[in-house]
Amino acid sequence: MANHKSALKRIRRNEAVRLRNKYYHKTMRNALKALRLETDKKAAQEQLPSVISMIDKLAKKNIIHSNKASNLKSKLTKHIAAL
């Protein structure tokens, strides 16, 4: 157990940040799934910019790796083009 006041605060802070990152990551995965399940090309093209924006924000905050973000965006774009 931590002995210093600052260490206790850091433990609390880490937990709060972990839960926030988990929420953002899960929200992104749900958006990806919804986009992949979309069968209408026009609706999928309307959703794509918001999902790409979400992916970019997570990559910028280091919640996901930048290469993973690039791969996801590329695969989504190809998937929508093939609809």
Image: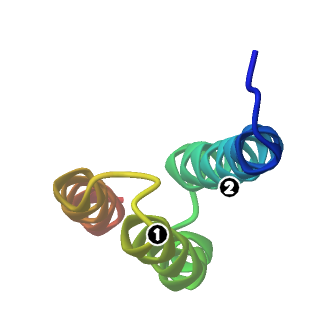
Front-lying residue, 8 or 46: 8
Q: Is residue 16 above or below residue 69?
A: above
Rendered-image quadrant of the N terminus: top right
Q: Quadrant of residue 51?
A: bottom right
Query: Mark 1 belongs to which amino acid?
Result: Lys
From the image, tell me which residue sits under label 2: 24
Secondary element at tag 2? helix
Mark 1 vs mark 2: in front:
1
Q: Position of residue 82 (x, y in %)?
A: 26, 59
Q: Badge 1: how crowded within 10 Å, few (<14), some, or many (20+)?
A: few
Question: Would you say 33 lies left or right of 27 here?
Answer: left
Give me the residue at 71% from left, 41% from top.
7
Give me the residue at 49% from left, 70% from top.
41
Give me the residue at 44% from left, 75% from top.
52
Secondary element at tag 1? loop
Q: Position of residue 80 (x, y in %)?
A: 36, 64
From the image, tell me which residue sits under label 1: 61
State the mark number for residue 19. none
Give me the residue at 19% from left, 54% from top.
71
Query: Mark 2 belongs to which amino acid?
Result: Tyr
Q: CA distance from mark 1 to mark 2?
A: 11 Å
Q: Badge 2: how crowded within 10 Å, few (<14), some, or many (20+)?
A: some
Q: Quadrant of residue 60?
A: bottom left
Check whether the beta carbons of the residues at disc 1 and disc 2 lie within 8 A of each other: yes
Question: Would you say 67 lies left or right of 56 here?
Answer: left
Q: What colour scheme was applied to this rendering of the protein?
A: rainbow
Front-lying residue, 23 or 12: 12
Q: Quadrant of residue 55?
A: bottom left
Q: In terms of sequence position, does the residue under pointer 1 or pointer 2 come before the other?
A: 2
User: What residue occupies the far top of the structure in this picture?
Assistant: 1
Rendered-image quadrant of the C terminus: bottom left
